[in-house]
Structures are given as C-alpha cells and as structure tokens.
Amino acid sequence: MGINVKRNNVTPEEAERLKKLCPFGAIEYADKKITITSACKSCKMCVKKDVDGIVEWQEEAIRTVDKSLWRGVAVYAQCHEGGLHKVTPELIGKARELAAVINEPVLAVIIGSGVDGQVEELLSYGVDTVYVYDHPDFENFAISTYANAFYDFIEKIHPGSILVGATNLGRSLAPKVAARCNTGLTADCTILEMKPNTDLVQIRPAFGGNIMAQIVTPNSRPQFCTVRYKIFSAPEKVAAPTGKAVYMEITPSLLEGRTTVLSKNDKPKTLDISEAEIIVACGRGFKSQADLQMAEELCSLLGGQLACTRPLVEAGWMDAKRQIGLSGRTVKPKLIIALGISGAVQFTAGMTGADKIIAINSDEKASIFNVSHINVVADIYDVVPRLIAKIKEGKNNV
C-alpha cells in the first residue's frame, strides 16, 4: 500500500502545488513526472488535498491462504554433540499442547548424518512423524544445504506451524527458510497459544519489555517462531511410541550450497548459567562492585552460580555471560535468589520458569515481587550477611 501517481504528464504548476502539500518533502518533479521518494510517511495529506487528481492512495491486496492445506505443528530437531539439543524436547512438549487444540499431528524434521538414535528419541517424546534428512554432507552445519533440506520439508509436507530453538544455529537457519517461504518469523517467543482456526499466537516482550506483543500471521503459512532454551518444559517420554519415521529423498539439488566445511574445531565450553540448579542474581541494589563479594560468598555456600541484570554488565561489574533476561540468558533453576533487583520485564522474562524464586528488595512495590514465591522486603546489606552467617552456622553444626 502507498501513494500512487495516476498521471505521467504533470505541469510545473500542478507539481508545485502538490509539493507544497507534503510536510516531509517526499514529492519530486522532473521531466514532467511526479516521483514519491522514500521520505514519504504515508500520511495521505497529498491525497486528501490534491484537487488535480494526480495522486491516489492504493491499498495493497491482502494475500490469502488455504489453511486446510497446511496441517501439523512441526519442530526443528537440532542435532548437538551426537544427540538432540536440549531445547528440542521442550519444543516438542509445547508442540503437543498446541496440536491438541486443533487436533493435528506433531511433526519433527531432523537434518544430519547418522541420526537414527536421535530419531528414536524424538519418537519417544510422542512425535507422530519424524521427517529425516540423513546424509554425510549434513554432518556439519552449512546454512545453504540445511536451508535446502528444511525448505524441501515445508514444500512437501506443508506444516501449519514450525517451532525452532533460538540457538546460534536456529537463529541463522530460521530467518533464511522463512524468507524463502515468504512468511513471517517471530523471534524469542515466551508464550505460544493456538487458535481453533489454526492461527498461532506468538507472544514476546516488545518495546524494551514494556508490552507483551501478540503476533499473528493469519494470511501466510507456515507460521515460524523461535523459542529460547528453558522457556518451556520437556514432556515425559512415551512408554510405547506409536509415531513413525519417514526418510526423505536426498536429491543433488539439496546438497548444492555456496559454502563447504573444510574442518571443524570445537570451541571450549564456557560458563553457562542456563544449566545452573541454584542461582544468586544481583541487581542495581548493589552500591559498588566490591559489594558483590557478599553475593559471591552466598553463592559459594549454596553451590550455585552468580548472575546479574543488564545494568551490572553495562557498568562493567560482571561478564555478559552471567546476564539473565531478553538480551542475556534464559534460566530455569530449582532456586534463584534475586538480590536488589527491581524486576523489569527484560529480566523476569528470562527466569520465571524457576521452581522457587526468593526476592530481597527494600522497595515493597518492586515488580520482582509479582513473580517471586517468597518476598523479603528488606535491605540486602542487612539480610545477606545474616543469611551467610546462618548457613555457616548450620554447616558447622552438621
């Protein structure tokens, strides 16, 4: 949609009148032709006040799709270190919930080399059909060939919705495949809901976490979204799986790509707070970097890992790998103790899956108390040292 020029031959007088109507200077005139530049804000001022009928507002034709031709909720099953990436079972659990709403099958697509073991594991999680692209050329990730296989799956199977893990691989692959399908992609969803008409409601924080945006793509299929690790829960394995595996034909065109993997060097494993069972998280309630020592001591006594909010990373007090939130890591520990954290959506979106949340904050109106299970309205400089002393006392009495 936008401004459309209806006439080719325009007099200088007509052009001058029209140019004066645009508050953004988006109308240009040359060789008796009017041109609408990229400065146009679609305010329609020129259309409303154009007495010469030179321009008009042209609505874009709404694309429609036959939703009955697209069935199933699919999960991209990422291979990782000889098995499935841990985000995959979580996506399957959510896919089963979504598929139950519309009574459609749960599908999975896996791309790799020698993946029979992973296929059996996918079926054990209750997947109805696993579509397998197994070939030696898929042993290492190359975005062109993986995208070829992924797109081949979509063209042949027509899944209505596709869930992809927001891993480094998933964040590279999903946009490329979605673009090929000329469909939308919602990144880092925190909530997914299914409408009875098969429209997937993709919910994620927006505008810096100030609102929760509900995104729907009713006129295109498939519906693509990425989801972070630790957002959803993995389902229990099925005692007697009834699903099946379909090994897809690997044609030469699928293996055509612009990149070739010559060698692979495994990156040394680094700190990953996503795997922590106990976390002590620090916020702006700490007055100085030196004061973090008491949080470190508490963390050490509990056998957990230290984490933080974004302001502490920006201040240079802690490493970005320890940040929880939308621009950091998503965690799902058994226990998280939030020290001096206000509880902005940017942070809480990354930790609400914790089994037990204890929040200590001197502000009784702090937003963190809306998501925590145990609320302590007090100064962290008073509570934390006493808590450390109690833990030490208990250990000494054992």
Image (tube, rainbow, N blue to C red):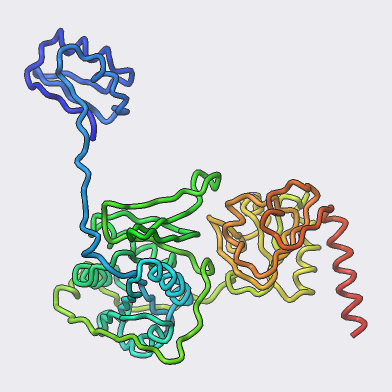
Percent from the top left, x then y, of residue 265?
41, 78
Q: Nearer the viewer, residue 226 or 127?
A: 127
- In this image, 338 relative to 114: left or right? right
* Quadrant in the picture for residue 256: bottom left
- In this image, 53 relative to 167: left or right? left
Q: Could you tell me which residue is drawn at 59 percent across and 51 percent down?
A: 345
Q: Could you tell me which residue is drawn at 49 percent across and 78 percent down?
A: 235
- In this image, 386 relative to 96: left or right? right
Looking at the rendered image, the quarter that the N terminus falls into is top left
Q: Nearer the viewer, residue 373 or 397?
A: 373
Q: Residue furthest top?
A: 13
Percent from the top left, x then y, of residue 153?
23, 72
* Quadrant in the picture for residue 301: bottom right
Percent from the top left, x then y, of residue 40?
29, 27
- In this image, 3 relative to 239: left or right? left
Q: Could you tell me which residue is drawn at 46 percent across and 48 percent down?
A: 213
Looking at the rendered image, the quarter that the C terminus falls into is bottom right
